[in-house]
Image (spheres, coloured by chain):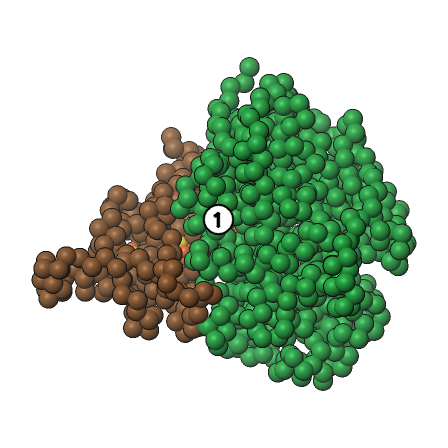
Chain colours: A brown, B green
Amino acid sequence: MLETITVRVFRGDANGGEEKEYRVKTFPGMVVLDAIHQIQAEQDSTVACRWNCKAAKCGSCSAEINGKPRLMCKSRIEDYYGEDGIIRVHPLKTFPLIKDLVTDVSWNYKTAEKIAPLSVSSGVPRPFRMQQVDVERVQEFRKCIECFLCQNVCHILRDHNRKDGYFGPRFMVKLASLDMHPLDEIDRRAQLHSEAGVGYCNITKCCEELCPEHIHITDNAIIPLKERVADEYYDPLKKVIRLIFGRNGRKMPVSSSSKK
Amino acid sequence: MEAYREHAFDVLIVGAGGAGLRAAISVMEAGLSCGIVCKSLLGKAHTVMAEGGAAAALGNMNDGDSWEWHFVHTMKGGGYLNNPLIVEIYAKEAPERVRELEEYGAVFDRTPEGLIAQRTFGGHVPFKRLAHVGDRTGLEIIRTLQDKAVSLKPKIFMEMTVIRLLKDGGRVVGALAYDRHTGEFIVFHARAVVLATGGWGRMYKFTSNSWESTGDGAAMAFEAGAELIDMEMVQFHPTGMVWPPGVRGILVTEGVRAEGGFLRNSKGERFMFNPEYMTDVYRGKFAETEEEALAWLSDSRKHRSPPELLPRDVVARAIYKEVRAGRGSPHGGVFLDVSHRGEEYIKRKLPSMYEQFRALGDIDITKEPMEIYPTIHYTMGGIRVEPETCASSLPGLFAAGECAGGLHGANRLGGNSLTDILVFGKRAGDGAVQYAQSVSGGKASAEEIEEEMATMLAPLNAASGENPYVLAQELQEAMQKGAMIERTEAGLLECLDKVMELQKRAKSLRVEGDRCYNPGWHTARDLQFTLRISEIIVRCALERKESRGAQWRSDYPGLSEEWGKKNLVAVKEGDSVKIMERPLPEMPPHLKAIMEEKK
Ligand code: SF4
Ligand code: SF4
Ligand code: FES
């Protein structure tokens, strides 16, 4: 491992900015977040970044390291500097910049508000009984630490800025966790189809590849959601039934296995 | 004069970890207006880092658990310094609060019958009491409460730091905060304020705590005149990561031991079997041979549990002594090995530990042992509160969760924090609602606002002064050395001198830059909180001349009957810290009877 490396940190705000270079002493096991902390403590205490757990559990320290969206606290420096000993650290591109490595991710929180929480009919006996096999998928989705790296990389949000049309992979995962919950009684298909915009996703899987929690965002969440929506909206027979009988807003009290 | 924005709520909640969010749910459900202020983004508070589980006598494992047993274990684990009335409420209400989380959307691991699965933890044995989701229970709980709270639409202010409680005479009527993005000041007017600001580990060098754990809530309450209790009691979690240096102090869940992990020294011995480490209250209750401990793995009802599952204070001390005796691992810890449970099991039960060591420590825990050493983890002491309402000694001020004291006494059992925040988050919310409905709005003191804004801005305007990072580091060195796991009068006095010197130097700080998202500037204010709290910790540790729970005075090695009858209370007098002895609350007869019966 090199004894010192060069960290080029993007410095700036909404009005623009540029990379600034810092020389940083290394130590075994060092992660990119350590380098930023060292810069703050020893060279420039105005460098702004977010962090909390330093153990890849809170999802605060997202940034683009050498152009790759990553958690800074989980990124070992030796995996990122090349022969030139340089690491470049930039803020997430998809969200408006506040300062340096800190971006305004409030859109995500506003989007979360649009999703109704779990609702279980009063007829379901308490305490709940659910089998482990039936909640495993939901538990996978609930591992999400809201790092918003998937939101950052999704081209629908990043390149096309369709934040008005698509909730993004993070919230597909959230909707899936509710939709596949064995006891949830809300029919979420209409929302998925319309304002959440599941149809926008064209399954490039960029989100799934970089999820630090290894959630199978596309395979396990988005594709099954697309299928459920397609069943409802594009099945010609269903369409006729809907025209005649009106839309049955309630999800049948299906067992989770039949939902899968 | 400096400008500020203003907001008014019936109840203001400071902190959005589990306790703050649960309090907010109560306030919103009561139909009052509620503002929540938090230092980080929503969902990133310390609750997210809790791993092992939430203790509650649900009895889902059919092992005969009951609230009475949970009560007894919590008192015992806390060295009987806990407030028994708080512990009673806690043990009784924890199951209901956990089940309520399922209603809000939490998805715990299940038993074969489909109920919430429970695991055991240190001090709870023989009962399997901790509701859990693998080793990410805290994430499950904070996300669940976050979603529920958000759906009730309180007003949430993220990335704002509250720096002062505002009073009208003797009553708390609001708080002053600054916006971390812009540096603007905000005055919150409220009829009741709930502090749910968490603990304080950042004055120590090796800690599992994030930057947020600077003790703001306890320090602000103290400065405003509230009583703090048990402040000498700082928990050293037995198992923090040791190597590489970048990860030193990061938590390794107690779940590793609960799932059968062994602790070994460099000679390969499972040193927890050493009778020297056993304490009187637990003698005879744990396996005494490795064979018995192994048998426990396959049948936990028939056999006594391994001594690795003694309470945290006991295990942390043993590890410390092993390393001191020269039986440590290469990087100055001991070994924790769970590899005998097999890859599939470990990946299922401890997935985030597996990932943490793989990515950060280059260790495959399904094949190799981990190196661990105690890390500063939790603070038992805090704002003194009333059991039923969580009211502090200041009218209008309530406290819940880690920033409050009384539930855990001298040592907290693993798993008792995640239900603490639920039970007393709710109670603090309810208490604040009741209070807010009974009083009219007060008027915040304009002088206090002015004074605090000036203090906050001083380091930015100063022509010269000290660097807050340097002082923070010196404080960490001093506390790590003098007020850590083993304490002596000489060491504590030296530490106190250093803290007082740093307090003086911290009167003139200087930072670069402007008010927009400036970590140096934020650190300058946090430092004042940690310095004050450090002083209180050290003064209380000096005062308590015995060893009990987390307080280990090697110059007073035994339990003292006298000291077992009182708590230490810290309160501000003039500008200094006054420490008072306060007799423990009387234990009512029905609780005495339970203690007697379940000895
Ligand atoms: S798979 Fe879908 S959600 Fe994921 S990045 Fe591609 S388009 Fe976006
Ligand atoms: S789904 Fe994965 S990448 Fe997306 S926010 Fe959650 S943890 Fe991050
Ligand atoms: S600091 Fe928590 S994920 Fe990096």
**Residue ranking furthest to the front:** B589
Left or right, B249 with respect to B587, comes to left
Please say if B374 is above or below B271: above
Q: Observer-nearest residue: B364 or A141?
A: A141
Crowd tier of the residue under label 1, counting other residues whose Cα lies within 10 Å: few below 14, some 14–19, many 20 or above: many
| Residue at position x 68%, y 64% in the image | B68
Relative to B423, say whether A99 is above or below: above
Residue displayed at 78% across by 48% down: B585
The quadrant of the picture occupied by the N terminus of chain B is: top right
- Residue A196: give x, y in percent of width and height: 27, 51
State the residue in front, A231 or A226. Answer: A231
Q: Secondary structure at mark 1?
A: loop
Q: Position of residue A105 (x, y in %)?
A: 40, 42
Q: Nearer the viewer, residue B468 or A203?
A: A203
Amino acid beneath label 1: Gly
Determine the image quadrant of residue B346.
bottom right
Residue B176 in view, yes or no: no
Report the quarter where the C terminus of chain B lies: bottom right
Which quarter of the figure has residue A178? bottom left
Residue B372 at what x, y percent from top left?
68, 64
The quarter of the rendering in which ligand 2 is drawn is bottom left
Q: Which residue is found at the position 55% from the left and 26% from the top?
A: B440
- At a point 30% along the width and 50% down the height, the residue shown is A167
Name the side, left or right, on which B79 lies relative to A86: right
Tell me the residue that label 1 is attached to.
Answer: B43
